[in-house]
Image: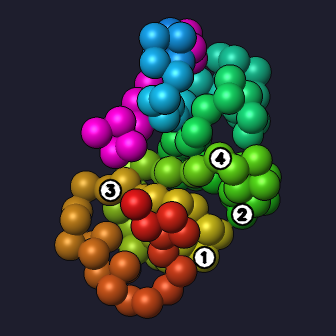
Amino acid sequence: MTDRVLVSRVNPRSLARVRLLDPSLRVGLLYDETTVRRRGGRPRPGWLHVDALHPRYPLASERYVRAAHARDVAVNVWTVNDPDAMRSLSAAGVDAIMGDDPSQLLGLRAGGSAWNRSSS
């Protein structure tokens, strides 16, 4: 099932350890505004050779998503509970939106807007 698993962690050292233990596993870095301030800036696509970046949703601009996609890195945002923010993030090209209300997320997906580039 490794093709269906994405290991997501806040600690980049843990992700590096996962890569060493099993290079076939996909990894994603989870971060928020606190992480950004502590480390001196947003993680850049290509940093740590992650497969995905998981920023808290206000940190995911369209420009950031484009830069990540140019390096074949997915952008999966969390925790989005506002339908307008969901639509905006979808239009920006994020790969996945994590939220607390599955019915809202399914409603957005059913709405026909750009939703999930990689539908995995």
* Three-letter amino acid code at the position of disc 2: Glu
Q: Is residue 114 above or below residue 33?
A: below
Camera-side residue of 6 and 110: 6
Q: Is residue 50 visible?
A: yes
Dot 3: element: loop
Q: Is residue 42 above or below residue 64?
A: above
* Mark 4 or 3: the one toward you: 4
* Three-letter amino acid code at the position of disc 3: Gly
Q: Is residue 73 above or below residue 34?
A: below
Which quarter of the rendered picture does the C terminus lie within? bottom left
Magenta residues span 1-16
Residue 49 on image: x %, y %: 68, 29
Residue at label 2? Answer: 62
Residue at label 4? Answer: 73
Q: Which residue is pictured at 69% across the width and 18% down the height?
A: 39
Residue 109 on image: x %, y %: 37, 79
Dot 2: element: helix
Residue at label 3? Answer: 99
Residue at label 1? Answer: 91
State the separation of the CA atoms marked 2 and 4. Answer: 14 Å
Which quarter of the rendered picture does the N terminus lie within? top left
Which badge, 2 or 1, is on the more N-terminal residue? 2
Report if the CB atoms under discs 3 and 2 are less than 8 Å apart.
Answer: no
Residue 26 within the segment the image draws in magenta: no
Report if the CB atoms under discs 2 and 4 are less than 8 Å apart.
Answer: no
State the separation of the CA atoms marked 2 and 1. Answer: 8 Å
